[in-house]
Amino acid sequence: MKVKKIILATKNLNKVKEFKEIFSEYDYEVLSLLDLSYPFLIDENGDSFSSNSYIKAKAIYDYYKLPVIADDSGLSVDALDGLPGIYSHRFSGRSASDIDNTHKVISMLKDMGLTESNAHFTCAITYMDSEKTITKEGYIYGKVILAPKGSNGFGYDPIFYLDEYKKTLAELPESIKNKISHRYNALLKLKEVLK
Ligand code: ITT
């Protein structure tokens, strides 16, 4: 029986699935904000992925007093000077869908006369409990293309192309994404420090 509880400070079902799979080897019962009725909106007003992950972790830790993992993540496109970056979730407006956001990136690159651009995903993860607060960042590098491909994953995965696989992240099985992703790499670094 899993006795230790940890809260994932997210309402994003896709992130919950990815974290739960990555966490399956650990002896934790993983709860997310989809299981708990956290009553407040968290204002992610930091100026970096790391500061936003800290803001989320602190809000949730202060309320539940249980170990928390919070992440903030997003896509940075070189030709767009790092945008959408920390605005990835709301790039096309507060209630924008993943498809709206993806199309905004595509149309900005098209307007610049480009057919692709180098890009990377960042994931900052903050772990917080009664004794420690640790933040680590992980990355995955590839390029953004103009024609979305694949239906796995979420967010900008259909336009994030990896030369080594000749596929977008959305064309890769989730079991592979979860061993190479920015989220996995950030969790690996965290694990090194926590053990
Ligand atoms: P929470 O704040 O509840 O965790 P969120 O979706 O708002 O959920 P973020 O603020 O971290 O999460 O925004 C991340 C956005 O970046 C997400 O909505 C996607 O558009 C994009 N993104 C992050 N990780 C991604 C991934 O693995 N694949 C594709 N897009 C990703």
Image: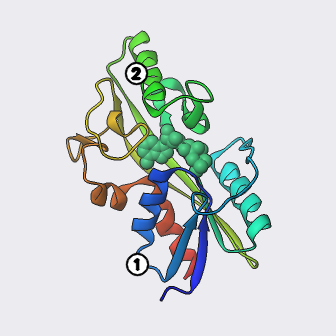
Task: Identify the amino acid type marked 2.
Answer: Ile
Which numbered tag is attached to residue 106? 2
Q: Up-down: is 175 above or below 153? A: below
Q: Regarding mark 1 in the picture, which secondary structure is present there?
A: loop
Q: Up-down: is 49 above or below 6? A: above
Residue 159 visible in rendering? yes
Q: Position of residue 124 (x, y in %)?
A: 58, 54
Quarter holding residue 34 = bottom right
Which numbered tag is attached to residue 119? none
| Residue drawn at x 40%, y 21% as measured from the top left | 106
Residue 72 visible in rendering? no
Q: Up-down: is 114 above or below 144? A: above
Colour logic: rainbow
| Residue drawn at x 53%, y 52% as measured from the top left | 123
For marks 2 and 1 on the same chain, the one whose residue lies earlier in the sequence: 1
Horizontal side, residue 69 vs residue 169: left or right = right
Label 2 – label 1 distance at C-alpha: 37 Å
Q: Regarding mark 2 in the picture, which secondary structure is present there?
A: helix
| Residue drawn at x 50%, y 85% as measured from the top left | 2
